[in-house]
Image (cartoon, rainbow, N blue to C red):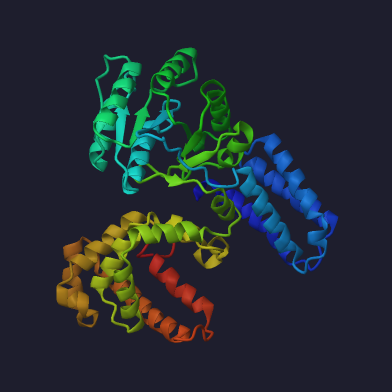
Amino acid sequence: MAAFESLTSRLQSVFGKLRGKGKVTEDDVNEAMREVRLALLEADVNFKVVKDFIARVKERAIGQEVVKSFTPGMVIIDIVNKELTELMGGTQAKLAKAAKPPTVIMMAGLQGAGKTTASAKLALMLQKGGHKPLLAACDIYRPAAIKQLQVLGGQIGVPVFSLGDKVNPVDIARQALQHAKDEGRDYLIIDTAGRLHIDEALMEELRQIHEGVKPDEVLLVVDAMIGQEAVNVAQSFHEQLELTGIVLTKLDGDTRGGAAISVKAVTGCPIKFVGMGEKIEPLEPFHPDRMASRILGMGDMLSLIEKAQAAIDAEKAAEMERKMRAAEFTFEDFLEQMAQVRKLGPLDQLLEMLPGMGKLKQLKDIQIDERQLARVEAIVKSMTTEEKRNPEILNHSRRKRIAAGSGTTVADVNRLIKQFDDMRRMMKQFSTMMGPKGPKGGKGPKGLKGMKGMLGRGPRFPFG
């Protein structure tokens, strides 16, 4: 996750020194905590939060459990992981559910935080969970805000209740609630107006909407890219509106990520969801334990597995595995596999979820350009069915035709075919190495080299 890249790197460096020690002294702990403190402050974590966090970790790290341990470095990492998890809320904070539908969710936030987009993402998440949400357009001030919500609602197939921009937002919210009841909708998501800054007029309108519909959830949408200011905004809203949760957007952007670590400790208000990018994809539930693992470079396999279970067809995956083991993998299968993997999200984000991937120098310089995937698809789709199934028949004249048909060069086509052959060979070797009874050894670096070949070298994935 881009938000924590620098912090993760710094922390891994600190803990790398501790791992190698058979015994850890109090001086070692103090030195490590000094570096952790600097890393957190650089990540824009609230100063008081950092101070309290370091004090708690240090108290436990110089205790008996570390002194008596055979692996003191690992015990300290475990302590930091647990304290970081607790700092961000401890456990996942789930959406409230009304005793009698619909559950009313009021979305608040400053202008530009991504509130309207987050409302649509939340609606999509609920819809995918088998619910019937309704969106209500109560931002009558920002030009095209109503239209934006209607367009987003149309894209995800969720209805939008609107009375235009001449009706009082409080009346719109009340009528939207009645409409949701009449239509049998189990969730009502109210997109309210924002301002460029917090003012009394904004708060008064939000309070009136709150009084009018009695929401079960009041979610504040804040932009992670504004760093510590996001925590200040959350605190101001919470004092006046009694928030029930926070949606942190743009956590995948060029940000230091301190808001995610600080906001629960400062406001007492849990992060319930995080949003990645501008595409209309479901919001991701915020899991403090998984986020702590990712920050510490330990990966997030649970989230990766959940993504895979939701997006990948199990029967197709099993058949694909059989073909790989038998070296029957074709370019047709390659296209199918690409489609399945792309459902999981950006490849660089998937790599970050794998434990230890950030430490592998072999993968450090890989920059995955999603646009290049389209070029790969164009090349494969320019092949005939016979060529896809039997890559061995791809002679020079066929490759020349494929290059012309895909808008690429013969060199690009040659490179992809070579990488495909290398991958098939590597999969076959891996299958033989693993065998039916488990691992039989083998040289790891060779496998990594093959993996890097398929991902690309440098910025020109996958033709690097």
Inspect this view and state whether residue 460 appears. Answer: no
**Residue at the front extreme of this rendering:** 99
Q: Nearer the viewer, residue 359 or 264?
A: 264
User: Nearest the camera: 455 or 284?
Assistant: 284
What residue is drawn where x is 18% and y is 66%? Answer: 382
Front residue of this view, candidates 369 and 444: 444
Q: Residue 207: which quarter of the image?
A: top left
Is residue 107 depicted above or below 40 in this figure?
above
Residue located at (35% from left, 43% from top): 126
374 horizontally vs 263: left or right: left
Please tell me whether residue 438 is drawn above or below residue 78 in the rendered image.
below
> Residue at position x 63%, y 39% from top?
45
* The one of 460 and 179 positioned closer to us in this rendering: 179
Q: Percent x, y for residue 158?
A: 26, 38
Please determine whether, in this image, residue 187 is positioned above or below residue 332.
above
Q: How many marks?
A: 0
Q: Residue at x 37, y 40 (%)?
A: 122
Q: Give the quadrant of the C terminus.
A: bottom left
Asked whether, in this view, residue 412 is left or right of residue 398, the answer is right
Percent of width and height locating residue 315: 30, 70
Query: How far across and how far down the image is residue 272, in percent?
Result: 49, 41
Where residue 231 sits: x, y (%)?
A: 57, 32
**Could one spot residue 423 in this view of the protein?**
yes
Residue 146 is left or right of residue 423, and the answer is: left
